[in-house]
Amino acid sequence: MKIAVLGGDGFCGWPASLHLADLGHQVLIVDNLSRRRIDEELGASSLTPIASMEERLAAWESVGGAPMRFVELDLATDYEGLVDLLRTERPDAVVHFAEQRSAPYSMKSPRHKRYTVDNNTGTTHNLLCALVETGLDAHLVHLGTMGVYGYGTAGMSIPEGYLDVEIVGDDGSRVEQQILYPTNPGSVYHMTKCLDQQLFAYYAKNDALRITDLHQGIIWGTHTDQTLRDERLINRFDYDGDYGTVLNRFLMQAAVGYPLTVHGTGGQTRAFIHIQDMVRCVEIALANPPARGDRVKIFNQMTQTHRVRDLAELVGRISDAEVELVPNPRHEAAENELHVHNETFIDLGLEPTLLEEGLLMEVEDVARRYADRADLDKIPCTSTWTAAQQAGVPASRAGRTAPTTEPTGGIVEHSA
Amino acid sequence: MKIAVLGGDGFCGWPASLHLADLGHQVLIVDNLSRRRIDEELGASSLTPIASMEERLAAWESVGGAPMRFVELDLATDYEGLVDLLRTERPDAVVHFAEQRSAPYSMKSPRHKRYTVDNNTGTTHNLLCALVETGLDAHLVHLGTMGVYGYGTAGMSIPEGYLDVEIVGDDGSRVEQQILYPTNPGSVYHMTKCLDQQLFAYYAKNDALRITDLHQGIIWGTHTDQTLRDERLINRFDYDGDYGTVLNRFLMQAAVGYPLTVHGTGGQTRAFIHIQDMVRCVEIALANPPARGDRVKIFNQMTQTHRVRDLAELVGRISDAEVELVPNPRHEAAENELHVHNETFIDLGLEPTLLEEGLLMEVEDVARRYADRADLDKIPCTSTWTAAQQAGVPASRAGRTAPTTEPTGGIVEHSA
């Protein structure tokens, strides 16, 4: 297949591109290199050393990989460039990773909020428009998030995108309906993925675009089979307060002998998936497109759930580090349960990499190996969710709606 | 109250501004005058003669109206200008009409789709960001549409924004939840109002913004108490295929002796409200803001429902015109039922203007009076919803998802 990977320079896009190329697909990477510019803006960088795109592509060929091409293009602002690209390349599938993916970054300032909405919504809508304009029947696979799911109920597992409900009529009659799962995003970033969902649903309905949306949990792990083949192919390991996912922060803190900082009580339960499983899921999704005229296919792309404090304890045990509770910068429920349906990928052959099996390798081969590159000042999250928090007032006293914490609550928020 | 009316030069914004000024509020109109530029783009114009903003404001003062001020500003692109305006003016309330509001216009081309999404989503998000950045606790009243409502069920009236559902747990237990009504927009324009809803829900939750969203039916009528006071105050009467609402098209066709063209079977049932009632609803909404920390207040702003063919027959009887069925340019259900809850406004004192009472005045005082200004070539709707329709293939044969037409269906689409 000819596959355009939008955002193919990023944390998920790069290993997915390598994996797809390794499977024999013709891969075209499209990226505006924004993730590298954000590193400069934040004065942060990946713990692992990231080669330039030119070096990455050359290294891949030097280890025998099928050549990949790269086009630098800003999809949110260069619509004509996107249309030209689709017309010229005519990909069979487009994998869309080209979004700003950090929740804390999306909350830093009005500029960051607006950038995240304009970039993510703009890119998604441009892509949908361009597919319609070119008449290209390419399968669009989008990286979404588990964070789009809103309300849960006790004992209910989060379904794969669509929720069965009963609606009571004026006369007391009941009708069953299947609806897009109601959203309740936890940040501006997560909100953009909810907007994406609406865009996908509309364009699948009106223009019969074939779309798969992957509701992904928090990625952990750094290496895939392909990124391990040469150090110049290595993937990002972000540990800063904005882009570092929760597990990476713990690993980094452990590697440099700091206490593991848990936000709030650490009672937040989150869904996780290893990066090797992520690239496999993209492969599986591409092999199982919806038919023309179908509604959007939605897969839950996660393999395990863990409480944040359990993660901290696990990392602490492996690396002999202490756990410390710090105030939560987010506006969210302190504790939640989380059960998720992920049968689609399991039934299609995904064999999960379990945290208990892979964690030690992360500590030894990544965090400790590159620890001398770490900038410890970058670990704390300094982005806050509200003006009151910024001024030092706890969220609970700022007069805002309390996050849902009812005992039946199962609010999911993707800790990007 | 000090009220900023965003989009105060438009079809709803102008009469609302006059009405609020007449009530004694200090009104600041903010508009980029885009509606006038779109007239030029389409080579169309209002049947009624629209004075320049300067003439409008002068005319209002000349009939004794309390002075209103006007600022020309593009809210979607000039965020800093918006922040400065809020900081300087510190309005108590902001009424947000500043969106591209035609469904056919939003479907004309990729450029029109992208403009509608960028303009509407950009303006709404800029406004929300700016309210948070300035810390201004202004009540935001937004003009939404009945078109955001998705699926209905037999015998169920559309509630005011939120739907009670029962969710069945893994163990068979049932939990009642109230969710934002699932959306199923019928055009890119309607989709933007669904995106707005998501933005409002998030910012009300995270930043305790006080927001009211008015889910409006199709406006009919031209005059309000204030626009009648001087011809230079007259409101728009759009009859072209893009901006003319269904009733205005019929009135115009009748006035010039053309058959009234009904799309499809005319079995589409729509919600309507007279423009005089619209301005009263805005007044009532402003007087009943949500509290800080409340969820978004949603009111259904409509007073009657009518089938399109019944409307045509009514206009035909009054004006002795014939009714003609033509192919439907939209991708929608041919027939639907529609029952809507609108008790909030009725309980708060709204006294509806009924179609049966006001229609004759529209025929005589507007359509016939200005008929010599009509450009008959502009009446047909030439925008199509899909590429296949554009190529002359009926929607039903183009392999796309059929619109929901189940007997229980109550899909609502706002015919803007």
Image (cartoon, coloured by chain):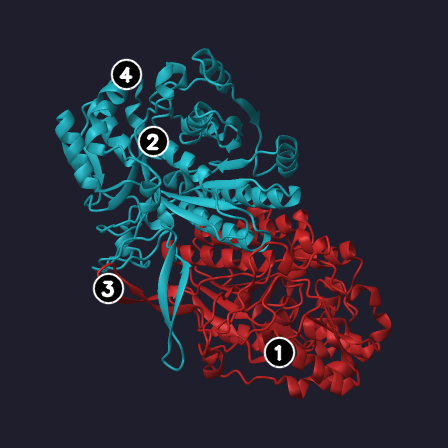
Chain colours: A cyan, B red
List x then y, in percent, for residue A256.
21, 22
Q: What amino acid is at disc 3?
A: Gly
The image quadrant that residue B327 belongs to is: bottom right
Q: Tell me the chain of label 3.
A: B
Q: Are marks 3 and 1 in contact (CB under 8 Å)?
A: no
The image quadrant that residue A312 belongs to is: top left
Q: What amino acid is at disc 4?
A: Asp
Q: Tell me the chain of label 1.
A: B
Q: Are marks 1 and 4 in contact (CB under 8 Å)?
A: no
**Image disc number at residue B172:** 3
Position of B84 with respect to B374 (left or right) is left
**Image disc number at residue A275:** 2
Q: Residue tagged by mark 1?
A: B307
Label 1 Cα neighbours within 10 Å, binned few <14 / some 14-19 / many ≥20? some
Q: What amino acid is at disc 2?
A: Ile
Dot 3: element:
loop
Q: Tell me the chain of label 4.
A: A
**Image disc number at residue A372:** 4
User: Between B236 and B88, which is closer to the camera in this rendering?
Assistant: B236
Q: How far apart are marks 4 and 2 (CA)?
A: 24 Å
Q: Are marks 4 and 2 on the same chain?
A: yes
List x then y, in percent, for residue B312.
70, 79
Label 3 Cα neighbours within 10 Å, binned few <14 / some 14-19 / many ≥20? few
Q: What amino acid is at disc 1?
A: Arg
